Amino acid sequence: MSDAAIRATDLSLTFQTNDGPVHALKDVSLEINKGDFVSFIGPSGCGKTTFLRCMADLEHPTSGSITVNGQTAEQARKSRAYGYVFQHAGLYPWRTIGGNIRLPLEIMGYSKADHSDRVARVLSLVDLNGFENKYPWQLSGGMQQRASIARALAFDADILLMDEPFGALDEIVRDHLNEQLLKLWAKAEKTICFVTHSIPEAVYLSTKIVVMSPRPGRISDVIDSPLPKERPLDIRDTPEFLEIAHRVRDGLRAGHSYD
């Protein structure tokens, strides 16, 4: 029980709109252990991001329950249990990279003496040493996303919630950041929940892949990856990798049978 970072039980969420109710999630039950790298994959509108937002206490379930580090989602938010990385870096253009990373530390009341050490440490984690005094517009898109990840890591959250952070980047940059993210995960020893539309990305990164069905979002398969923790990019050409990718694809097809 103590190893669970996130536990959802019969989680459902219905949005009330002017056009009637929208059933975003239905009867979702899942356990994520500390140190897992879990990817959520499914068609657009299947509730992947909504589920992530429930973990972050940004959306509130209609029924069922969710705990984060053994706490309610609200308690976990207040205790700063997670960092959140969005699809777009969301860096303030008038602040330097260091200034952007310091922002949550300022908001949370960390001492100024602590800022420099934390900024230097997380910049090193994401391989952005020497860029503290640059502005976002002076960095490539991939570097901006790495700065966004550094900002989410600055206050030592146990859990990293990542909502399609590489979705807007080209394939070459995305491959490079996937490699770097795995190295970061190994060094930082965080629990990562990662939303993606890419089957290869989900299989390459994850210890567990959660396949979701179209709305209302349900889990159609949970795949525990047998791949080793250290994964060069060319592992994607191996029979083991392709077998998992086929199972993900089959799970996405099976989910559509609910229509």
Image (spheres, grey):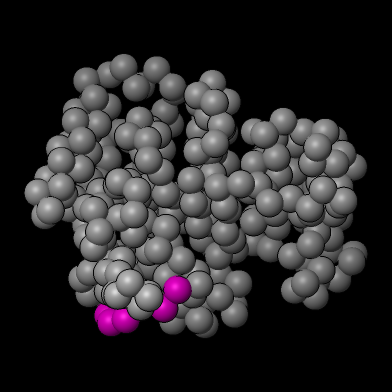
**Left or right: where does residue 69 sit relative to residue 165?**
left
Answer yes or no: is residue 228 visible.
no
Q: Is residue 83 magenta?
A: no
Residue at 31% in and 66% down: 24
> Relative to 200, does residue 51 appear above or below in the rendering?
below
Residue at 43% in and 54% down: 193
> Relative to 233, does residue 106 appear above or below in the rendering?
below
Residue at 22% in and 20% down: 239
Q: Where residue 235 appears, x then y in whole percent?
A: 36, 21
Q: Where residue 63 appears, x then y in whole percent?
A: 28, 82
Q: Where residue 147 appears, x then y in whole percent?
A: 71, 44
Residue at 34% in and 54% down: 45
Answer yes or no: is residue 142 visible.
yes
* Stretch in magenta: 59-64
> Relative to 88, does residue 156 appear above or below in the rendering?
below
Q: Nearer the viewer, residue 170 or 84?
A: 170
Q: Nearer the viewer, residue 59 or 245?
A: 59
**Left or right: where does residue 51 sit relative to residue 220?**
right
Query: Residue 217 is drawn in which quadrant?
Result: bottom left
Q: Where residue 197 appears, x then y in whole percent?
A: 37, 40
Q: Nearer the viewer, residue 140 or 22?
A: 22
